[in-house]
Image (cartoon, grey):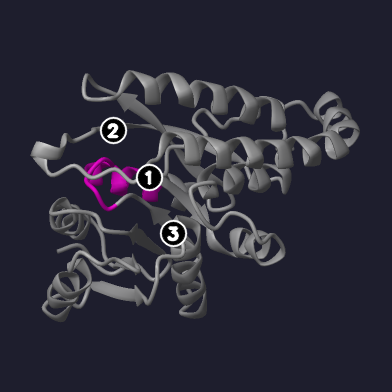
Amino acid sequence: MPPRSTTHLVLIPSYDPGRRVHDTVRAARAVWNPVWIVVDGSTDGSAERLAALAAEDPGLRVFVLPRNAGKGAAILHGLRAAHAEGFTHALTMDSDGQHPADRIAAFMAASAAHPAAMILGRPVFDASAPALRVRGRRISNAITNLETLWSGIDDSLFGFRVYPIAPLLEIMRTHRSMRRFDFDVEAAVRLRWRGVEAIGLDAAVRYFSAADGGVSHFRYWRDNARLTAMHLRLLGGFLLRLPWLAARRVRRPREPL
């Protein structure tokens, strides 16, 4: 097992994840220590099974929220606990096996080399990726690039990332959004607005069918409506910042916004 890091941890939000959660946790623990998982009001019995794993593994910690509050809220719960214990960075990943545990060490190394930056995954899709989802994220990516003046967010929705904890917590304390599916996009945009550099690294993503144990809580109309509302909110903030952002980009084109 890897040695315990005192600065960087893996943080996994989980809601009714299906049977692949155990493979996800084991794969993450094989390459990193510690790994924390926040069970977001799951009703599928996964909380009990994960607690049993944690009882035998001091590098695994499980938090259980009493009701489903959303991905961002689950991550916020973990970030608060991590910050209180002195951790400075958290790598977030999904619990359903889509994200590549074998890339954790490389992302953590990039974060250690650039501690003021966020390390954002660039998804490398295979044939399992639903075409509608791939096309749909291009729209979000285009709007996100506009909101940040094309400053390094290659993919706005991919949740395999390393965040510096302190600035992200400060943003989430002052914004009551970012608690559900909108978390990944808004976190990246608002961190860029604060001047946090974005560094992109490739990471393979795999979509599992139901027969292979895949579980998706994405609801096309509901979640796209939330994303639309979020982007309208961010575009408003972008327009207010535009003169300052544009002037800074002209003066210092290579610096963060």
131 is higher (above) or lower (below) than 220: above
The residue tagged 3 is 90
Q: Which residue is mark 1?
A: 107
Sequence-first tag of 1 and 2: 1
Q: Position of residue 16 (x, y in %)?
A: 26, 58
**Earlier along the polypeptide chain: callout 2 or callout 3?**
3
Residue 192 placed where, x, y %? Answer: 66, 42
Left or right for 147, reference 29: right
Callout 1 environment at 10 Å: few (<14), some (14 to 19), or many (20+)?
many
- Please determine whether, in this image, residue 36 is positioned above or below residue 125: below
Q: Is residue 77 left or right of residue 48?
A: right
Tell me the element at label 1. Answer: helix
Q: Name the residue rendered at 67%, 47% in the picture.
A: 190
The Cα–Cα distance between marks 1 and 2, rounded to whole angstroms, is: 15 Å
Q: In this image, 188 relative to 79: left or right?
A: right
Where is mark 2, residue-wise?
A: 205
User: Where is residue 106 shown, x and y percent of the image?
Assistant: 33, 43
User: Magenta region's main secondary structure?
Assistant: helix
User: How far apart in space, not on screen, are marks 2 and 3 (Cα)?
Assistant: 19 Å
* Residue 112 within the magenta-colored segment of the rendering: no
Q: Mark 2 falls on what kind of element? A: strand
Q: Mark 2 against mark 3, which lies toward the viewer?
A: 2
Question: Magenta stretch?
Answer: 95-109
Rounded to the nearest whole Å, what is the CA distance between mark 3 and mark 1?
11 Å
Lower position in the chain sequence, tag 3 or tag 1: 3
- Find residue 164 and report its image quarter: bottom right
The amino acid type found where label 1 is placed reads Phe
Foreground mark, 1 or 2? Answer: 2
Tell me the kind of residue under disc 3.
Ala
